[in-house]
Structure formats: structure tokens, C-alpha cells
Amino acid sequence: MKILGISAYYHDSAASISIHGKIIAAAQEERYTRIKNDPSFPSHAIWYCLEKADVTLEELDAIAFYDKPFLKFERLIENYYANAPKGFLSFITAVPVWLRKKLFLKDIIRRELKDINNGKKTTVKLLFPEHHLSHAASAFFPSPFESAAIVTLDGMGEWCTAGIYSGKGNQIEVFKELHYPHSIGLLYSSFTYFLGFKVNSGEYKLMGLAPYGNSKDIPPYINIIKNELVEVYEDGSIWLAPEYFSYTTTLKMIPIPKWESLFNIKKRNPEENIEQQHCNIALAIQKVTEEIILKIAAHAKAITKSEYLCLAGGVALNCVANGKLMQSDLFKEIYIQPAAGDAGGAIGAALAAHYIYFNKKRNNEVEDIMPNAYLGDDFDNESIKNYLHKKNAKYHLYNEETLVEKTVELLLEKNIIGWFQGRMEFGPRALGMRSILADARTPEMQKKINLNIKYRESFRPFAPIVLEEDAFKLFDLSQTSPYMGIVTALKEKYLNPIPKTFEKYTLAEKQAHQQSDFPAITHVDGSARIQTVSKNPDTRIRKLLEQFKAASGTGILVNTSFNVRGEPIVRTPKDAYTCFMATEMDALVIGNFILLKEEQPEQNRIHRKTFNPD
Amino acid sequence: METIKDIIAFLMDRKKYWLIPVVLALMILGVLLIFAEGSAIAPFVYPFF
């Protein structure tokens, strides 16, 4: 059974291909077009998936699109009907888009696939699993659990904005759904917007900003949120006060003047200074979000009677809340889909078609059906060398053992390394294939990478990549975290004492305070977003961490995605070399080659002044 | 034609018959808007549609 999964037209379009229920390849369109969060039809990603799987379009058993367009249209129409005459501007923006394109999705998909199919319209069966079913399938089927509770949380799908499901074998049963306009994702996004970050991509910045808030100052904000904006019920469902959310009828998330008078602060504009009050509001909404998620999870456990949990949907990328969920011990183990956002819908749609629609047996004990999320393009040494020759780049070629040794030497000398190996990761996180690496013990490293490499806000933390066996010694961790989906605290013995007056520190002073023995990966509250690296599979990043441990005592490094602000993660050797030459990165380790910045031809240097907002 | 058939099947399946006139009226209005629409529409902050 060969199924192509597609997500497109909203944000993060992507494609995946499953053969006999195993994901063979998956990629986001943004990596090809170099447009971050590209929503366009994922033609390049589809080309790649079919080529990697060595399958032609006509050989497919089905193509599964990750949501139901008619159901979405129904929600749209009912929304306008319920709110009329309010919402006319929104209506005249939305309806032409639907009448021209989205309503005719079947035809559009067939037309878009024509080029891939030698100019012929495909006759392959088209399936449209619901948006949240796609999320649920993306979380449950790749999980190692035979049965589990599934919770999906995002901005919105068709009607559903959050769901509780029960997965068993090859079936998923719907237990409860929360419907539009009441949405945890949109609540969080409203604060993202109010605090000056971009909706749909800046949410992780809000999450990163929250720990700078002062706990003692947030109760008034929490009261405002829970008394005025949102009613939180015991089962975790919520009711948003319509007077404070304008996305149902206008082109804005919120009525700004109302929020300004509610919180007694002006809406922050992008690139404006971040004040303590912004951090406090960020912490308040983060706490409320965690409360909602914990309540939903507890309710999911109660009604499904399951000991395991699977999570997906954009809100499942809130790894701080995931960490709280892990610490709550509600479940024995939690599986979080690495591509929890809409890109992961491409995987979920394909798997839902295979297991549910075609009723194929599931056999997860045998193998990981989306192998470590390493599902993207790879490039051999020959193709890397050809590119480097074309650029007259100076390189050193080593065997694997020496390459790893030399890289460790560079890291110990406090160099920042671009690391490009093997198949590209699927999802928003770099998991050791397209990463920027550095020594986590170096105090100035966080600021240096933020300002000179990534060109992004200095408050943003970096995640550690750590040997699985060391992770349990260093962090308060009760399960592995292979996909960087969980934030938890460093063990106390590695943390430095917090000064008594810490809450009075400015943002810059808080950042300057050395939190732990691993300052480059420790956030201001002593936490870190962990990626654990196990022995299986035997990857080059695992070898590097082992070698680094032998040299330094601990197998831990800074790991951030190989890109600069506003750009997608690098995919090809060309992307990697360009990014390397446009930043202050010291070395590039690509395949079996090491390139040192000081040896590169001056004409290859790229001097960039502006970066796209992210 | 396939889309129209699909929409009718969808409305029957959902048993939301009351939506039929609303959908028709709004679609007529929508078609008019396609012909009449201007270009200066504020960018939307979230892709709701």
C-alpha cells in the first residue's frame, strides 16, 4: 500500500510517502523554495518523496490531503452567517479565495500533480481525513504504544481546535472535541500578537520569553486572563469571551484598545524593546496554557483509561507545557510527534489512510515507522565535493574517525560549527543532521550564536543535544526526549544559586547571570529543551557526542537549527555553504569534509545586512 | 461538476439543509465579489481560510 500525504495552503506545506505503513520520506516545501513556512502546494516535496520511494504517481494507492475543505467552508459560512453584518471585510477577503481555489481542491490537486505525472491528470483516489484526525494519526501511529490516549491541540482545523481520542491497534476513536472559535492555540496566538511577535511562528518566542517574567508579579495578570478572557473548565475545555477576540469578524486577532486597557500596557510592536511587563504577561499566559493542557490530559486519562499519551497539533510544540505534563506523572510515557504542526499533517493523513481507511494491520513493536524523523534529502561526499569545487572552497577530507576527532578539537577550542550530515530532519527542529553546534560550557556562547550567527533576539535560549545516558544524570527527566519536545530543569547540583534580588534584575542582567555549569543551554529559569541521543540508530552525531564526552567529561553540546533568522533550515550543500559564509560560524563539517572560515576565498564571503522577520 | 456533486453530498451527509440557501446566496455574492474585488485589502494576521 503506497500513500502520498499532503498538507498545503495554510502554513508549513509538506509531503510524505508511506509504503506498507512506514514513512519512507517526508519534507516541507519551505526547504526547497527557501520561503519560511511556505503554504504553497508542495510540488518539490512531492517530487522528492516519490523519487526517494522510487514510486510513480500512478503507482500510488491513494493521495491523502490533511483536512476536509468542505467542512472548513461550512465553518466559515456558519461563522459569517452567525456574525453578519459584522465580518463583511473578512468575508470579502475569504470567500473569493474559496470560490476560486479551495472549494475545488480535488481538481486543484490533480492539476498541480499534472507536471509530476508527465502532463497527465492523475486518477489516483483522493482522500480527505479531518485535520485533527491527521494530527492524531501523526502522533499515535508512529508512537511505540499499542493503545494510548491522544490529545490534539492547535489554532483550528475545520471546526475542531482540540481533541481527545483513543488509539488502539490500527483505529482511532474520537472521544471529545473543542470547537471553533474557542481555541487554546488562538488564545496563545492572541498573546503572541499582543506582545509583538508574528502569529503562527512567534509562539515559541513567547514561550522563551515567559521565564523572564517574575512569578510574584503574575497573579494579577492570571486573574485578568481567567476572569475576563477565558473560562477554563475542569475537563480542560475553554470558553473565550467574544468581546476580547476579533478573529471571527475582523482581520485582526484581538481588539487592541480593549486589551490595552485590560492589561494597562500598549501593544508591543515588532522590534520594540521588551519590558518586564511583557515578560510577566508572557509568563501569565504560559501558566494558564499549562493549566489548560494539564486539565485536558487528566481528563483524557480519565475517559480513555490509558497509561500512555500521544500529542500533536501546533500547541504540542509548547515543550515547556510538555515538560510539566511529564513531571505530573499522569502518564507512564508521552510521545510527541516531532512535526506536531501542520507539516506533520502530511504524515498523519498518509498514516490515517493506510491504517484506518484501508484497515491495514499495525505492527509497531517491530520498528519505528518514521525513523527518527530523518526523512529528508541526503547528499553523498561526491555531490558535496562537486559543489565545493565549483565554489573554489578550501576543504579537508577525512575518514569518519578523524572527522569526528577534528570536530571535537574545534568545539573544545570554542568554535561554532555548522554540522551537515545524513538525511535532513522532518519538522521544525534540527536533530543533529542540519545543526549548529557549540560547547555548552562556554558562558558567552548563547549571546554569540544569537547575535552573530542566527541574528535573532538575544533573550532566546538554545537547546542541548545530549547522550541519552548522560541526560538522566544532568536533568530532571523521567523519559527520553529524542525530538527535543520536552523542557525540564537541570539537576540542582549543576545550577548556580539565584541572587535574592534576581527578580529586580533587568532583562539584560538576567541574561548575563550564569545559571549553571552549562550556561549556553540553560534558560533563565534553570531549564533546558532537551534532545536525547540514543545508541540506536548509530548516527554520526552520537559518535561526536561520545568523543566529546571522552575529551570533556560530558556528552552535551549546544544544538540549534542550521539557518539564520527568517530562513528555513538548510537543505543542500549550497544552502549550508551560503549560510556558513554569511555568518560568523567558524567551521563547516559537511559529509566527510571540514571547512575552516579563515581558509575560505574572500570572494565567497556574503555580507548580509537585513533578515526577514520571523 | 464533481465539486458541485460533492458539495450536495456533503450537505446531505451533514443534514444541514438550512445551509443550502445560505451557501447559494453567499456564493452568488462571492462570485460578484470576484469580479468586483479591489486589491487594497489589509493583510490578514492568521490564515483562517
Image: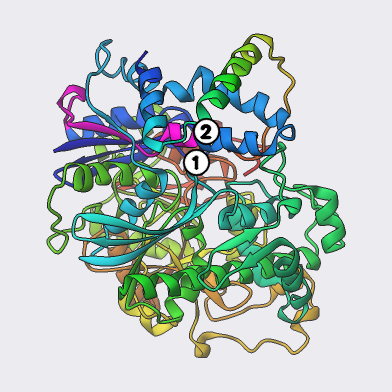
Residue A330, given in percent of the width and then of the height, sits at: 40, 79
Label 2 vs 1, first from the N-terminus: 2
Residue that label 2 marks: A35
Quarter of the image where one finds residue A217? bottom right
Image check: A226 left or right of A158?
right
Name the residue at 48% across, 68% down.
Answer: A296
Work out how far the residue at label 2 is from the one at label 1, CA to CA, in angstroms: 7 Å
**Quadrant showing the N terminus of chain B:** top left
Taking depth in this image into account, of A369 and B16 the one nearest to the observer is: B16
The relative height of residue A548 versus residue A614 in the rendered view (above or below) is below
Residue A546, given in percent of the width and then of the height, sits at: 30, 71
* Secondary structure state at the residue bearing disc 2: loop
Taking depth in this image into account, of A277 and A611 the one nearest to the observer is: A277
Q: Is residue A62 magenta?
A: yes
Image check: A55 left or right of A393?
left
Taking depth in this image into account, of A610 and A258 the one nearest to the observer is: A258
Bounds of the magenta segment: A54-73
Q: Chain of mark 2?
A: A
Image check: A441 left or right of A448?
left
Residue A487 seen in the current view: no
Badge 2 vs badge 1, beta-carbon distance below 8 Å:
yes
Taking depth in this image into account, of A397 and A201 the one nearest to the observer is: A201
Image check: A422 left or right of A496?
left
Name the residue at 45% across, 49% down.
Answer: A341
Residue that label 1 marks: A568
Quarter of the image where one finds residue A614? top right
